[in-house]
Amino acid sequence: MPAFTVRSLDKIYPGAPPVRALSNISFSVEEGEFIVLLGPSGCGKSTLLEILAGLQQPSGGSVLFRDRPIIGPGGELGVVFQDASLYPWRTVAANVGLGLELRGVDKVQARRLVEEQLSLVGLDGFGGKFPHQISGGMKQRAGIARALVNDPDVILMDEPFGAVDYVTRNKLQEDLIRIWQQRRKTIVFVTHDVGEAVFLADRIVLLSPRPGRIAEIVTLDLLRPRRRGDIELLQREARIYEALRALEPTATVA
Amino acid sequence: MSVESIESAVDVQTTTDRDGRTTLRSLAAKLPWIVIIQILVVAAILLGVQIAVDSGAVKRIYLASPTQILAAFPQLFTRENLLFHLSVTLAEAGVGVGISAILGIATGIAMGLFPKVHRFLNPFLIWFMAIPKVTIIPLLTLYLGLGFEHKVFIIFLFCYFLFVFNTIAGIKQVQDSHIKVARALGATQRQIIWKVVLPSAAPSIVAAVRIEAATCLLATLFAEIVASKAGVGNLLNKLSGIYDTAGVFALVILVTSIALLIIYLVDLVERRVLLKWKYV
């Protein structure tokens, strides 16, 4: 049974004129799979992720999570957002523990679970800091810890490493792979960075813009652990760049 | 000279985090310049007033000399029963601003969360807020008398609206992504309000508290000066009525000190409790 099954999904934002964000999207995500939604801006990849999270409703078609329709966000999925979206008035530990607090988990157990997540993402000793006291990379780590704290089987990530510098991003990607392998999670990861997609994914769902539709699904049968700069990795990257270029509307000279 | 003084001012600020010895030396050597000049300015003004009054160049009903003002303080406590008047004023101010805060924040939350409540109440609020308070004071005196309730109601008119509108503004400021985070973790509507919306509105509400802390004292004195039986404003009326200029100056200094103290205390509570996270 796949984790997600998406069938002929449409998303239209009402208005004058209505905006068609997603059109006829069909794919599935297997349990334990690392799937990347890749595409240029405006291809609706974040919208698609929010529909999987239950934060938005589809306009047509069906989305199933373990063969059941997604009614709304239920807390069984972990979601990591673009800008970490930590609450500035809470310490890092209190941010990470938010999910436990909402479920009413007892305080002693919650503290232990929070410590566990912090150490998993490499934030030992930073629990008492406030978000404005830590770096962008550390904020994303805290965001990931917050998504992990309820121990969800599936984690949805919306361009989580878009705002951090190159070196930090590489480190975060490697740590994410480690966490994914250690915890046997299913991950749906949105990005517009081809290098990132090829380094992380089992499969890449390539989306084309306006309206967002699936251009191609690329299966990466590359060995793990992957090494950056590996010739095979670079060849895959080059092919995806080519596919992306083919998606661009041909420029017309006015 | 000017370049040097700018450099030295910068030094004082930056050397604090280098090492202790240079900090102390630069403080001792450089900071006092400004302080000394400030003290000299104040001293010159006080001395000028003292001489002007003592020599008879300015009549005593217009101005009081620093020594006369100092001498007026003990008399305020003994002859005028200042502590009683002060307790009346502070009680009125405290109760008035307290009621304004509770009702104002509650109204603001209701309006911020429910658009229909906002649409219904907004025109009424704007009408009430627009009434120049002075014009209805005779009516209020007729309805509520000269005492406590009269003052509390006037303070309420001064303070309520800012609490309402700052709470609404704060609630509007909540980040979409912060709500999404909570929803994705399975939060109920109620949990979203308590754990996301209200904490997001807190800085804006605290800003209202900060302003009202000074405003409530102003409103109380205003109401007491217009119509009252007791309170610092009442005493002020009495003293100016008998041309006790030194007493009036002493009262003004006292009230100013109390206002400063209140602002300082609010600041302290903000830093240590309400918005502690901002200051670490």
Image (tube, coloured by chain):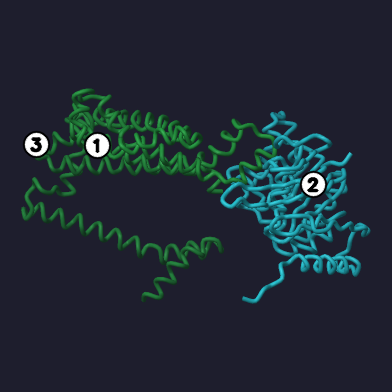
Question: In this image, B280 relative to A117: left or right?
Answer: left
Cα–Cα gap, marks 2 and 1: 61 Å
Say which element carries label 1: helix
x 32%, y 40%: residue: B215
Q: Which residue is mark 2?
A: A120
Circle 2: is it few (<14), some (14-19), or many (20+) Cα within 10 Å? some
Left or right: residue A139 compared with residue B101 = right
User: Mark 3 sits on what residue?
Assistant: B242
Residue A125 in view, yes or no: no
> Disc 3 sits on a residue from what chain?
B
Look at the numbered discs 2 and 3 and tell me whether their residues touch, using CB distance below 8 Å. no
Indicate the secondary structure of the residue bearing disc 3: loop
Along the viewing direction, whichever of A114 and A159 lies nearer the viewer = A159
Which chain appears green?
B
Q: Residue at x 73, y 39 (%)?
A: A114
Q: Is residue B40 above or below residue B145?
A: below
Please state which amino acid type lies under the numbered disc 3: Ile
Indicate the chain on which mark 2 is placed: A
Q: Of B206 and A58, which appears nearest the observer?
A: A58
Q: Are marks 2 and 3 on the same chain?
A: no
Write down the quadrant of residue A70 in the picture. top right
Identify which amino acid the numbered label 1 is placed on. Lys
Q: Amino acid at mark 2?
A: Leu
Where is residue B218, by image quadrant? top left
Q: Which residue is mark 1?
A: B133
Indicate the chain on which mark 1 is placed. Answer: B
Residue A220, placed above or below residue B180: below
Up the image or down, A34 lies above or below A74; here it is: below
